[in-house]
Image (spheres, grey):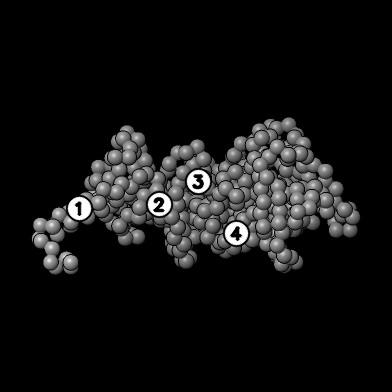
C-alpha cells in the first residue's frame, strides 16, 4: 500500500518516531565531535553540554615572528606576509602525550618549508655539506622551545609542518549530557572556546601534539652536528665500515652500549629506497625495532626541545628530533634495522637508522655507531 492511502494518524505517528530516532543519537565524546554546521569564517554551533547555541568565530590574532640563524635572508614575518602564501587548511586534534586535551581546530597556515626556502638556508662550508644534521628551533613568546629536524621538514610532504595563522574550533552540535557529567565535560568544552595564541606550530606527523606550541616568536636554523665527530675525507674512508654496536650518550646520561635487541618487539617495513643523489634503488624489506622503545628502555624520556645526532664511523650523520622519534603515529617513527630482505645486515655494520616517513633515503644511516642526545634548553 502506498503512503497516500495510509490514515493520517499513522503518518503522523511514523513521522514523530523518525524524528525521535534522529535526535536520540549522542555525540559520544567531545574529543571527536561531528562537524559543526558553520562557515569557515564563523557560524553558529551548539554547546555540547547544555544544547545552547553560541557564535563561533575565526581567530586571526597572529603576531610577527623572526627567521634567523643559518639563512641568507634573515627576516621578520608579519601576518600579512603569511597571507600572501597559498593557505593550507587542516583539522588538528590537539591532545598531548599525557592525555590532556587542548581543543580541536581547523587551522589555516603556511608550510614551514616554504618560509625556510624563502629565507634560503645556508650551511657554512665544511667537509660534511649535507643539511641533514641541521635543527630548526621554534621558540614562542613564553620562552618554550621545540626542535624539528631539517629532514622532517624537507623530506616529508610540505604541508606536514605548518605555521598556522587562523583557527576555527570544531564544536559539537549535539548535547552530550548522557555521556559525561558537567564537571568533566565543561573543561573540555572550555578548550574548544579558548583564545589561541597565533601563529601556532602544527606538526601533522605527530600522533601527540606536545610540539604544537602557540605564539611563535622566532624560528632559528642551527647546526647541531658541527662539534660532534669528524667527517672523513672520501679518500680516508675505511674500505668497510665496522660498527658492532651503538653507543648512546649525552649530557646527564652514562654511555649505554646497544648491541642486542632480542627482547624488543620486532617491526617490519617495506620501503622504497630513492635517494636524492643516486635515485631509485628498489624496495627494501627491513626488520628491526622501534628507536623510541630502545631509548625509553635506556632511560630517556620524550623532550620536545631535544634531538638525537646519529652518526657512523666515517662521520656521516643525520639529526632526528625527539618529537619525530617519540611522538610519531604508531608504525611511522624510526626503526633501528638489523635485517634487510630476510638477511642479517653485515654490509656497513650491524645496524641502520631508518626514518620510515622520509621520502628520500638520505637519512637512512648505515653502520650507525653513535646516538648522541642534544638539548636546546
Which-is-in-front pick, marks 4 and 1?
1
Choose the circle earlier in sequence order: 1 or 3. Answer: 1
Choose the circle earlier in sequence order: 2 or 3. Answer: 2
Q: Residue at x 35, y 35 (%)?
A: 184
Position in image of residue 366 (x %, y %): 77, 52
The residue singled out by tag 2 in the image is 105
Position in image of residue 189 (x %, y %): 34, 42
Which-is-in-front pick, marks 1 and 3?
1
Distance from disc 4 to disc 3, alpha carbons, whole Å, reads 18 Å
User: Secondary structure beneath disc 2?
Assistant: strand
Query: Is residue 165 at all visible to an observer of this figure?
Result: no
Q: Residue at x 31, y 60 (%)?
A: 39
Rendered-image quadrant of the C terminus = top right
Distance from disc 2 to disc 1, alpha carbons, whole Å, reads 35 Å
Which-is-in-front pick, marks 2 and 1?
1
What label does residue 156 carry, if any? Answer: 4
Amino acid at each position: 500500500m502506498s503512503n497516500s492511502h495510509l490514515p493520517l494518524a499513522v503518518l503522523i505517528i511514523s513521522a514523530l518516531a523518525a524524528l525521535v530516532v534522529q535526535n536520540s543519537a549522542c555525540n559520544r565524546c567531545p574529543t571527536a565531535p561531528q562537524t559543526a554546521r558553520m562557515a569557515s569564517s564563523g557560524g553558529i554551533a551548539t554547546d555540547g553540554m547544555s544544547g545552547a547555541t553560541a557564535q563561533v568565530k575565526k581567530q586571526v590574532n597572529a603576531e610577527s615572528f623572526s627567521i634567523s640563524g643559518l639563512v641568507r635572508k634573515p627576516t621578520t614575518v608579519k601576518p600579512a606576509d603569511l597571507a600572501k602564501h597559498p593557505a593550507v587548511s587542516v583539522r588538528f586534534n590537539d591532545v598531548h602525550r599525557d592525555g590532556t586535551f587542548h581543543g580541536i581546530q581547523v587551522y589555516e597556515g603556511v608550510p614551514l618549508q616554504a618560509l625556510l626556502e624563502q629565507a634560503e638556508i645556508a650551511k657554512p662550508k665544511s667537509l660534511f655539506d649535507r643539511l641533514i644534521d641541521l635543527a630548526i628551533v621554534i621558540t614562542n613568546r613564553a620562552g618554550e622551545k621545540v626542535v624539528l629536524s631539517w629532514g622532517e621538514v624537507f623530506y616529508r610532504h610540505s604541508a606536514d609542518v605548518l605555521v598556522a595563522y587562523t583557527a576555527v574550533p570544531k564544536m559539537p552540535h549535539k548535547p552530550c549530557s548522557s555521556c559525561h557529567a558537567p564537571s568533566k565535560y565543561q573543561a573540555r568544552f572550555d578548550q574548544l572556546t579558548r583564545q589561541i595564541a597565533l601563529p601556532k606550530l602544527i606538526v601533522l606527523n605527530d600522533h601527540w601534539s606536545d610540539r604544537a606550541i602557540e605564539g611563535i616568536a622566532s624560528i632559528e636554523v642551527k647546526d647541531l652536528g658541527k662539534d660532534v665527530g669528524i667527517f672523513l675525507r672520501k679518500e680516508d674512508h675505511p674500505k668497510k665500515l665496522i660498527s658492532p654496536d651503538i653507543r648512546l650518550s649525552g649530557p646527564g646520561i652514562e654511555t649505554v652500549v646497544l648491541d642486542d635487541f632480542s627482547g624488543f618487539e620486532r617491526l617490519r617495513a617495506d620501503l622504497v629506497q630513492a635517494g636524492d643523489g643516486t635515485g631509485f634503488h628498489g624496495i627494501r624489506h627491513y626488520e628491526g625495532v622501534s628507536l623510541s622503545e630502545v631509548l625509553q628502555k635506556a632511560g630517556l624520556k620524550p623532550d620536545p626541545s631535544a634531538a638525537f645526532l646519529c652518526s657512523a664511523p666515517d662521520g656521516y650523520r643525520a639529526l632526528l628530533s625527539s618529537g619525530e622519534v617519540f611522538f610519531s603515529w604508531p608504525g611511522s617513527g624510526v626503526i633501528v634495522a638489523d635485517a634487510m630482505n630476510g638477511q642479517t645486515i653485515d654490509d656497513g655494520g650491524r645496524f641502520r637508522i631508518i626514518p620510515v616517513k622520509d621520502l628520500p633515503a638520505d637519512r637512512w644511516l648505515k653502520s650507525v655507531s653513535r646516538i648522541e642526545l642534544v638539548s636546546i634548553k
